């Protein structure tokens, strides 16, 4: 058993767990920022496009590859419009 001032196995294991927790939190924050980014609405539209593509692919007999480009054609101008409008406000 380790005493409070020692560097025995129990003490070293506690530091490892804390460092691992910090790294897991940083990893999650990176992916959240990467996926959501500046506009959560674009991420939501992409997720909705993926869901619609999945549902259509399971129910219809024709190709549904066109759903995602359509989602991008809606998301990109909408996001740009919001960004320009926000920058003009100051």
Image: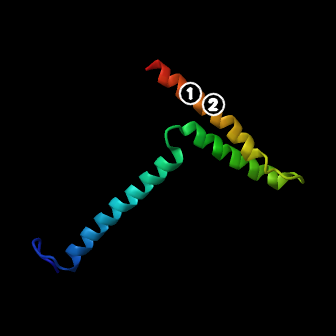
Residue farthest to the right, as pictured: 61
Disc assigned to residue 78 = 2
Callout 1: SS: helix
Q: Which residue is mark 1?
A: 82
Quick check: 41 above or below 56?
Answer: above
Quick check: 35 above or below 21?
Answer: above
Quarter occupied by the C terminus = top left
Q: Which residue: 15% across, 76% down?
A: 7
Quarter occupied by the N terminus = bottom left
- The x, y position of residue 47, in whole percent, is 64, 46
- The x, y position of residue 3, in whole percent, is 11, 75
Q: Which residue: 65% across, 36% down?
A: 75
Count of numbered circles in the view: 2
Contact, CB < 8 Å: mark 2 with mark 1? yes
Quick check: 76 above or below 85?
Answer: below
- Left or right, 18 with respect to 67, comes to left
* Structural crowding at the residue carrying mark 2, measured as other residues with C-alpha within 10 Å and reported as few (<14), some (14–19) or many (≥20): few
Q: Which residue: 81% across, 55% down?
A: 58
Specify the color scheme: rainbow
Marks 2/1: CA distance? 6 Å
Disc assigned to residue 45 = none
Q: Which residue: 63% across, 36% down?
A: 76
- The x, y position of residue 61, in whole percent, is 90, 54
Callout 2: SS: helix
- Left or right, 60 with respect to 79, comes to right
Q: Quadrant of residue 40?
A: top right
- The x, y position of residue 87, in whole percent, is 48, 24
């Amino acid at each position: 058993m380790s005493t409070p001032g020692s560097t025995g196995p129990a003490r070293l294991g506690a530091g490892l767990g804390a460092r691992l927790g910090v790294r897991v939190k940083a990893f999650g924050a990176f992916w959240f920022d990467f996926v959501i980014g500046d506009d959560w609405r674009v991420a939501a539209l992409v997720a909705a496009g993926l869901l619609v593509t999945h549902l259509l692919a399971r129910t219809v007999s024709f190709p549904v590859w066109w759903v995602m480009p359509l989602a991008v054609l809606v998301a990109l101008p909408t996001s740009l419009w919001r960004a320009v409008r926000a920058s003009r406000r100051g």
